């Protein structure tokens, strides 16, 4: 894993960024753990040329 961050438009989800072949990156969107259930993989993104390109489509929440 290269990086993880909370998604701006979905506060209950976190993006985990991973390296892919040929210098590309992709992400897993994971629904955060709750008292009633574990964290769950919701979606795997397509491959992007950079983390910045991934964040353009899936923006990071403001701190």
Image: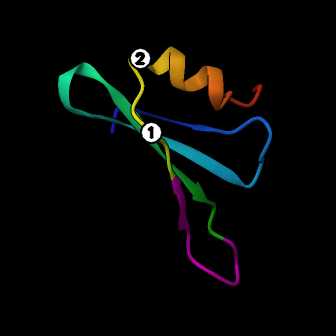
In the image, which disc is placed on residue 46?
A: 1
Q: Residues within 10 Å of mark 1 (few under 14, many from 20)?
A: few
Q: Residue furthest bottom?
A: 36
Q: Give the Cα separation between the discs numbered 1 and 2.
A: 12 Å
Q: Quadrant of the N terminus?
A: top left
Q: Residue furthest front?
A: 46
Q: Quadrant of the C terminus?
A: top right
Asked if residue 4 lies in the magenta stretch, the reply is no
* Magenta span: chief secondary structure: loop
- Circle 1 SS class: loop
- Which residue is under mark 2? 50
Residue in the foreground of this view, choosing between 10 and 36: 10
Q: Residues within 10 Å of mark 2 (few under 14, many from 20)?
A: some
Q: At x 77% / y 25%, what residue is drawn?
A: 62
Q: From the top left corner, tell me how far across and down residue 51 is, in percent.
A: 46, 20
Asked if residue 38 lies in the magenta stretch, the reply is yes
Side (left or right) of 3 relative to 52: left
Colouring rule applied to residues: rainbow
Q: From the top left corner, tell me how far across and down residue 19 is, in percent.
A: 28, 32
Q: From the top left corner, tell me how far across and down residue 48 is, in percent.
A: 42, 25
Side (left or right) of 47 relative to 44: left
Residue extent of the magenta highlight: 34-43
Residue 60 vertical placement versus 34 (above, below):
above
Q: Quadrant of residue 20?
A: top left
Residue 21 vertical placement versus 33 (above, below):
above
């Amino acid at each position: 894993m290269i990086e993880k961050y909370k998604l701006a438009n979905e506060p209950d989800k976190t993006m985990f960024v991973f390296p892919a072949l040929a210098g590309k990156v992709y992400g897993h969107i994971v629904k955060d753990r709750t008292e009633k259930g574990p964290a769950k993989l919701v979606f795997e993104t397509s491959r992007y040329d950079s983390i910045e390109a991934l964040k353009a489509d899936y923006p990071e929440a403001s701190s």
